[in-house]
Image: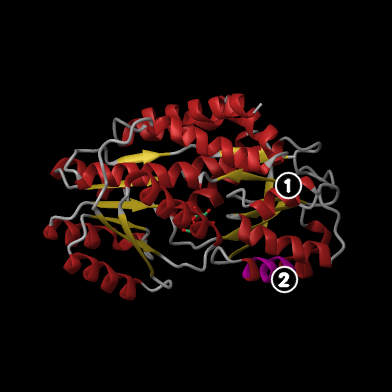
Amino acid sequence: MRKVLAALLASAMVFSLAACGGGDKKETEAATEAPATEAPATEAATEAAGDTEAATEAATEAAGDTQAAPAANGEGLKIGVCIYKFDDNFMTLYRQELQKYLEETYGAEVTIVDGKGDQAEQTNQIDNFISQGVDVLILNLVQASATETVAKTCADAGIPAVFINREPDAAELERWESEGVAATYVGADARQSGTFQGEIILDTANKGDINGDGKVSYIMLIGDPENVDAQYRTEFSVKALTDAGVEVEELFAQRGDWDQAKGQELTANALAQFGDQVEVVFANNDAMALGAIEAIEAEQRKMNEDIYLVGVDALDEATAAIKEGRMTGTVLNDHIGQSHTAADVAIKMANGEKVDTKYTVDYVKVTE
Ligand code: BGC
């Protein structure tokens, strides 16, 4: 089963990487198509949820498959990595895999620093890396809106930049393309993850309308309103319902900064205010969803009977909760595929190769 799964995931990723070669337009088309294709990846995910380890292994194998032969030797290359904040569940998995892969596959010298959620501090860290003369930078910016300034600083210093996780504006990506800037973005298309969240709700027995009043009443736990992942997940999860002709009612939508404790607090507040009216909890990520579980259980609500909950990331704790019937579903945010792609592209750029301006890795639905 693992081999089959690996092959399915690999083909999903190849499709995604191939789809992004031609820049932004194709990218958007691929994004709109992907959720509708209900690709083999979906089936793979359903199987995978039962076996988290298998899913992770499959993703690793799959990622390995798309990279095939490493482009060039990374021996002796100095790579600076800036992470927006170490205290983030998903980015912790991402950075650990990134470091391991860069060191083991390429023999590169990797230094990773913690931006502590402070753009000014991170800008200093970038300046330090530049004065140390690193060969390439991998950047998970605190504020995606700082991309243009940072890209210009890197270009002036002649250092290629790989932006990860927080998608820059389309206009900035076009500038890199038209001006031949040595910069690229590696991430996932958050529209797809939002759509998958909505589809998970549509796949429930009553399409999310538990009380049968003709509409789905939901609360939305928002990651960070400045972040494109948060914006798209918020928009596209609900859009999947309305596109399917389902009426919706937003009871509550507040920012939880991707954080478990805040997810708990917001859900507790929403349940205190709206009680049984809440049929669906959409969380922009699993950390907040895990917080929501605590609040839902404190109110003695019955998961998948009188309330549904979906997240994004497929953290181990979330897939375990799904298996135990304490959460409805999540969407795999493939930190392995993304970190390996970012590393491969960084090595190519450090060796002077030209790369595309954008690479995306597919999300995968995960349910019981
Ligand atoms: C992940 C979140 C994470 C965020 C950080 C998102 O893609 O789903 O869990 O907090 O990235 O930027």
Camera-side mark, 2 or 1: 2
| Kind of element beneath mark 2 | helix
The residue positioned 43% from the left and 73% from the top of the image is 116
User: Coloured how?
Assistant: secondary structure
**Cα gap from disc 2 to disc 1, whole angstroms:** 19 Å
* Residue bearing mark 2: 269
User: Does residue 83 show up?
Assistant: yes
Q: Is residue 178 left or right of residue 114?
A: left
In what element is the residue under mark 1?
A: strand
Position of residue 71 measured from the top left corner of the image (x, y, whole percent)? 28, 35
Q: Is residue 24 above or below residue 299?
A: above
The front one of 269 and 334 is: 334
Report the amino acid beneath label 2. Asn
Q: Residues within 10 Å of mark 1 (few under 14, many from 20)?
A: many
Residue nearer the viewer, 57 or 312: 57
Number of numbered discs: 2
* Residue 275 in the image, given as x and y percentages of width and height: 81, 63
Mark 2: few/some/many CA within 10 Å (<14, 14-19, 20+)? some
Q: Main secondary structure of the magenta part?
A: helix
What residue is shown at x 38% (from left), y 65% (from top)?
Answer: 142
Residue 216: which disc? 1
Q: Which residues are magenta?
A: 262-269
CB at disc 2 and ligand 1 closer than 8 Å: no
Whether tag 2 and tag 1 are in contact, CB under 8 A, the answer is no
Q: Quadrant of the image for the C terminus?
A: top right
